[in-house]
Structure formats: C-alpha cells, structure tokens
Image: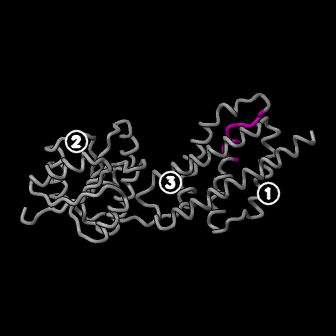
Amino acid sequence: MAETVKILFVDDEPAIRATLPAILRLHGFDVNSTANVAEALQAIAAQKFDVLISDLNIGSPGDGFTVVSAMRRTQPNCVTLILTGYPAFETALQAIRSQVDDYLIKPAGVDELVAAIERKLRNRTPHHLERLKRVPQIMRERVREIVDSVLHSERRILQLPRIHLTEDECRRNAEAFVKGLAAQVETNSSQLTPEMLELSRQHGKARFEQGYSTPMLVQENRYFCDAILEAVRQNLLVVDLSQMLPEFQLLSRALSQMLSEAIAAHIDIERAA
C-alpha cells in the first residue's frame, strides 16, 4: 500500500494491547492503542484513522459499539472491525452486521486479522449514516420486541389461577405501558404526567385483581426496565448518544414513580378488602 495504514486498536486487556498492536506494526501498520471508551473517543477526535479494531466489551458489555458509532459518524471512510470472545453472541452480532464492516472471534489469528483489514480496505466505501434516534423513538419502534421479552419473562406470573387475561389483552396492556413511558421521557420532566399517574394507579388495581403480590409488581417493573435497555443496546449504532444518558435517567425515574403509584393503589385495595 502506498501510504501507511493507520489503525486505532481498542481493548481493555493490557496483555492484548502489548502484543497484538506490536505484531500489526511488524506488518507495516501504524497502530494507536487505547484501553477504554474515553481514550478511544479522544483519539477519534484528534486523529484520522483508516481502520478501527475494537473489542466488543471494553469494561462493559457492548461498549465497542459506542466506539464504532463515534468513528462512523466522524470518520465515515474508516473500516470498522469488532473483536468478540463470545461466539454465542454471534446471533446478536449478525443482526447488526450491516452496521459494522466485519467481526472476528477472539483470539483472532494474525493472518486472519491482516487479511480482513486488507480485504476491507480494498473494498471500502463510505458508510451510510442513519439518522440518530432518541430513546423514546427506539422504544416505540421496538415495542413488539420489548413486550415479547416482558411477557416471556413474566410467564410464571401470568399463570396464576386468578388471572383471566388473554394473550392479546396482556400484549395490549404491555404495549400501552411502553408507549406511555416513551411519551413520559419525551416530556423531559422528572414528574409523571397526570395520564401516567392514572395509568400507574389503574395498573396497580388491576394487578391486585389478577392476583399479583407487591414483590411481583417490583419484578414486573424490572422486566420492563431490562427489556427497554436491551432494545436500546441493540441499537447503539444509531442511538443519539448525547441524549441517551439523560433519557435513561428520566426513564429510571419514571419507572420508579410508576411502580410506587402502582404499589400504593395495590395496597389501598388490599387493605379495603
């Protein structure tokens, strides 16, 4: 190659940072190594790179996608490669493979990695940047997946003998809950709207009639939280990272307040009974 290929290598394991970049340099690459997301983002802002090679989990699961997202938006011509030590995660990676140039299973052989770099450089084209999405938009677009996850986790609760809800009714109720949460986050308010207060209270009353205990309400709230976070994690490459943290904070507050209101209504009916 006429010009030296500049690579940004991101991995939180010191041993790998000490060995793999050195080997890549022996193959003629100019390699800059970073140990975490913050260092990687600083490097992306300061220098131009031809290739990004990032571990999938840099400190936290999925952090590599944050680095990929930042690189794609600031340097769309850069080839992006993900390394993962978890072959079982391949199915999830396949779903977003169109957002990453390629991925390799760790420990990747040097020859395999070099071949992948050279192949992708020969065929590289600027990435098509998708419009950034806010967390509420992802919640609405992925409402079916979120509800599927919640209902799957909740099967044991839904089998209580006093519950007489059809699958469709359960799904409609859960979808209303998710869409209501999305609307609440969009208000940018730390206090529940009157509509969400009423929805929470009615939910607590309905769950009492359906045989839920207070711990079940708490667990159900966790199922919704986990499912929403997973939906966002699967969309890290298109989520608006500048808004993600404050929107998560709003989401967390809303879920907590909704749970408190539901429990209060639940207890009121329980005492009256």
Q: Quadrant of the N terminus?
A: bottom left
What residue type is disc 1 on?
Glu
For the residues marked 2 and 1, what is the alpha-carbon distance in whole angstroms?
54 Å
Q: Nearer the viewer, mark 2 or mark 1?
A: 2
Q: Which mark is residue 108?
A: 2
Q: Quadrant of residue 52?
A: bottom left
- Mark 2: secondary structure: loop
Q: Residue 205: horizontal and vertical position, in percent? A: 82, 45
In screen coordinates, is 240 left or right of 261? left
Q: Nearer the viewer, mark 2 or mark 3?
A: 2
Q: Decide whether the magenta segment is chiefly helix, strand or loop.
A: helix
Identify which residue is drawn at 9% across, 52% down. Answer: 26
Residue identified by numbered label 3: 232
For the residues marked 3 and 1, what is the alpha-carbon distance in whole angstroms?
27 Å
Magenta residues (range): 163-173
In-front residue for pair 180/247: 247
Q: Residues within 10 Å of mark 3 (few under 14, many from 20)?
A: many
Identify which residue is drawn at 80% across, 31% down. Answer: 162
In screen coordinates, is 72 left or right of 149? left
Identify which residue is drawn at 43% across, 67% down. Answer: 131
Q: Residues within 10 Å of mark 2 (few under 14, many from 20)?
A: some
- Mark 3: secondary structure: helix
Q: Which mark is residue 198?
A: 1
